[in-house]
Structures are given as structure tokens and as C-alpha cells.
Amino acid sequence: MQQDTQTMRNNDGLFAVGSPVTHWSVQTSNPVQYEIRACENLLDPENSTILEDASGSSGQRRFIVTDGVVDSLYGDRVRAYFDHHGVEHRVLVLNDGETHKSMNAVLQVTEALDAFGIDRRREPVIAIGGGVLMDIVGFAASLYRRSTPFIRIPTTLIGLVDAGVGAKTGVNHNGHKNRLGTYFPADRTLLDRSFLATLDARHISNGLAEILKIALIKDARLFDLLEQHGADLLRNKLQSPADVGPTPADVPVDQRLAARGLHLDPATEVVERAIQGMLEELQPNLWEKVLERVVDYGHTFSPTIEMHALPALLHGEAVAVDMALTTVMAERRGLVSSYQRDRVLEVMARLGLPVWHPLCTPEVLGDALRDTVRHRDGKQRLPLPVGIGSALFVNDVTDGELAAAAESLAALGSGVSR
Ligand SMILES: NC(=O)c1ccc[n+]([C@@H]2O[C@H](COP(=O)([O-])OP(=O)(O)OC[C@H]3O[C@@H](n4cnc5c(N)ncnc54)[C@H](O)[C@@H]3O)[C@@H](O)[C@H]2O)c1
Ligand SMILES: O=C(CO)[C@@H](O)[C@H](O)[C@H](O)[C@H](O)COP(=O)(O)O
Ligand SMILES: [Zn+2]
């Protein structure tokens, strides 16, 4: 007991502070640990990875959530997998796409969970799908009985390099992007790049936009890889090995890569660098107490543009438009040379991404910035690129600067073709 300050401390570290006002201050901590693992042949019945449980006390039932498109492509294999392992399961199939990323979908999951019934700690919910599906299921899992463990199996490129590796869940609400959500990482994310083989080119491009985001703000080498191999990665859907040089077939792949100064094939290196870069930023600031986040690059104007354009623009496409605009702003401020700006816009085009959109009007951009300022606690905290592979934050963007940048981009954008 510390009589001088009238503070008592019991064995749990709980403080009771005496007169003039008695109050208790509760302190505890909630260590977070989650796993992201690259795997192959996840749906092969002989591969037990999905059923391995970090706690080692796996239950015998599984609730799986997927969307209609993924179910039509992989649903038979998913069901056969759990049948093979004798695991009683229910597969809930949600509507796919951003327009269905809503609270209704979350409630659909929680109601189906109630109907199936799962053990609270040892039977993790399994989300198999893209960023939309994982955001919905993660949100439902975080709400269900105040938190229910879940596993993510991303099947899109955005899912693999971004939505599947962080801690955020959420849905669109009241016309706003991700307005409701939680911080609730999956216990495990299992990355199997072979799912990308069935994605169309537009959705590969969509994911490449988030990879380009990491390149522009913190990884010049990643940018070079995208510049050099982006078109092949898009064509090969990041199925390794991409463009490792002319055969002869008798020269092993790793020797051909080494001859070109590569240790990994480009698809593997690009995916690994993107995830590594993302996690380096997320880990020290998982709960976003610090609102100056370089990974918010491309996410200042895009949430408003994406919601206004819905469903015409995909998430990564809106992010690309935002990055093109802010690259032009950075060039106008002398942070990026005109040569670097043009390289960035060329790479976007090579990756199949838009560099401009008719919604880049002064009105929409101004509204977007004001909404973002709210989100960032009263300051713009706008990440701008410095050269290629670095960034800084600014707080002094004016409506005039936005209008001028949009006008420049419109002129430049028409000269850059996808
Ligand atoms: N939580 C986060 O940290 C985070 C990070 C980045 C993005 N996001 C969110 O992710 C969403 C975008 O993710 P997305 O692009 O994966 O969207 P998505 O989940 O809508 O998937 C895109 C489309 O591809 C289909 N699909 C999925 N896997 C497929 C496959 N293997 N083959 C063929 N088709 C397949 C889906 O059915 C859908 O029609 C956005 O809502 C964005 O806000 C969240
Ligand atoms: O799209 C991504 C990341 O690529 C999401 O995690 C997220 O929307 C971004 O981090 C945004 O910049 C912040 O938006 P919000 O989730 O805080 O509304
Ligand atoms: Zn994003």
C-alpha cells in the first residue's frame, strides 16, 4: 500500500485510488501473435495444413465461408477435402463482390454460425475467398461471442498480399468504405498462390496495385521488379516461374535466375517483398494508434472514388488512380522528378491499371480529403512519394493544388494507355 498517494495495489496490478475521488484503473495487455504461411496444394486431401491447429486441440467440425464464384471453382474440392478428413462441415456461400460487403453479409454469417454451432475456441471459422469475403468473415468472427478464432485462405492477389496479412476487418456502411470494422487478425493465413491461376487479368492487376503501393513508398527494388517483370507477372498470373530467361531446358531454373542476378523467381520475390514490406509497417502499429501510415498511400482519395464509382472501379483500381494523382502532386512539389513520375505512370499502365478516372473532379477530391482528415484525427497526414521507394507526410494540400494536379493528370493520363 502506498499511503502517501492513497493508492493500493493488489496482486493483479489493479489500482484503487482514495479520496477525493475513488476510482480504479485497470491495466492489462493482450499479446497478439498470428501466422502467415506460404503453402502449396492446400486443397490436396493428403495435405493436412488447413486442419492443423496452432493450439494443437483441433475440434472435429468446421464452418467454412466462401463466395459464389470461389465456390463454383473450388467448392467441390473444399467439400471433398473435409469429407476425406472425416470432418463434419458446413459451407456458407455468400454473394461475391464489393457491393455485398455489408452488415447484412456479416449477420448472414453469424446466423449461419448459430445454426451450425461450433466449439468456441477449438473450431476456427475458415474464410476462403478474396479481400471482400475475408473482411466480412473476419468482422463476423470478431463479433461472434465477442471473438471466435478464424483462418484465412486468400484466393485473390489482394487477399494474398494485403487483406489476408493484416489485422483489419470491416464492411462498407452508410455509403462509406470500411466504415464499420474491427482489428481482429486471423490466427493463421495460408497462402497458396495457385488459386490465382483462375483469376481474370483485371483482378491480377487489382492486386498488383497494392504491391505497387508498397514499392512506391518503401521498396525501390520491388518497383524495379514490377517495371521489368510486371507484364509477365500479369500474363502468368504470378504462377512461378515467370520469365526466367530463354530456355535451354537443361539449365536449371535457379541457375538461369542466378545468371540474371535473381535468387527467387520474380513472382515469388514480388509477393514476398510485398508481404514483408506490409508487415514491417503493420507490426509496430497494428492498432493504428499512429495515424501517419505510409501504407495509407493510395488510400486518401480512393475510398470516396471507389464508393462513388461502385461497382465500376475495383479497389486496387481506385488505389491506382489515387497513386497516379499523388505522384503528379509530388512531381509538382519537386519531390519526384518528371522522369520518375512518367516511369510510375508507365508501370501502372503496364500492370493494366487505370491512371485517371472522370471522378477526379475538384469537388469529389475535396470531399474525399475532408472525409480523410476526419479519419486521420483532424490532419491530412497525406503520404506523398519522395523519388521512388520513399515517402513523407504533408498537411498543407489546398483545393487549388488538388484541382491543378487533377488537371495535369487528365492531360498525362490520356497519353498513357493500358
Ligand atoms: N482488411 C484489409 O486490410 C484489406 C486490405 C486490402 C484490401 N481490403 C479489401 O479487400 C477488398 C478487395 O479484395 P479483392 O479484390 O480480393 O475482392 P473480392 O473478394 O471481391 O474478389 C474479387 C473477385 O474475384 C473472385 N474470386 C476470388 N478468388 C478467385 C479465384 N481464385 N479465381 C477466380 N475468381 C476469384 C471473387 O468472387 C470476386 O468476384 C476491398 O473491399 C478492400 O477494401 C482489405
Ligand atoms: O485497403 C486497405 C489496405 O490496402 C485497407 O486495409 C484500408 O482500407 C487502408 O489501410 C486504408 O488506408 C485505411 O482505411 P480504413 O480501413 O482505416 O478505413
Ligand atoms: Zn487497399
Image: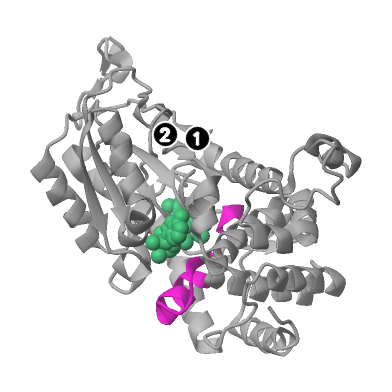
Check disc 1 and report the residue beneath it.
36
Please tell me which residue is depicted at 41% across the width and 75% down the height of the picture. 307
Foreground residue among 406 and 413: 413
Place of residue 44 in the rendered image (x, y in percent of width and height, measured from the top left): 43, 35
Foreground residue among 192 and 336: 192
Please tell me which residue is depicted at 38% across the width and 32% down the height of the picture. 45
Say if the magenta span includes residue 88: no
Is the CB atom of the residue marked by disc 1 within 8 angstroms of ligand 1's nearest atom? Answer: no
Place of residue 72 in the rendered image (x, y in percent of width and height, measured from the top left): 34, 58
Instruction: Name the side, left or right, on which 411 lies relative to 69.
Output: right
Task: Look at the image and tell me whether residue 111 can be seen.
Answer: yes
Q: Quadrant of the N terminus?
A: top left
Which of the 4 image quadrants contains residue 248?
A: top right
Task: Look at the image and tell me whether residue 149 can be seen.
Answer: no
Q: Residues within 10 Å of mark 1 (few under 14, many from 20)?
A: some
Q: Residue furthest left?
A: 115
Foreground residue among 236 and 24: 236
- Please tell me whether mark 2 sits on a helix, a strand or a loop: strand
| Identity, as a three-letter code, of the amino acid under mark 2 | Arg
Instruction: Name the side, left or right, on which 29 lies relative to 359.
Output: left
Please tell me which residue is depicted at 25% across the width and 34% down the height of the picture. 83
Place of residue 162 in the rendered image (x, y in percent of width and height, measured from the top left): 52, 50
Magenta-colored span:
293-315
| Identity, as a three-letter code, of the amino acid under mark 1 | Ile
Q: Quadrant of the C terminus?
A: bottom right
The relative height of residue 225 versus residue 77 in the rendered view (above or below) is below
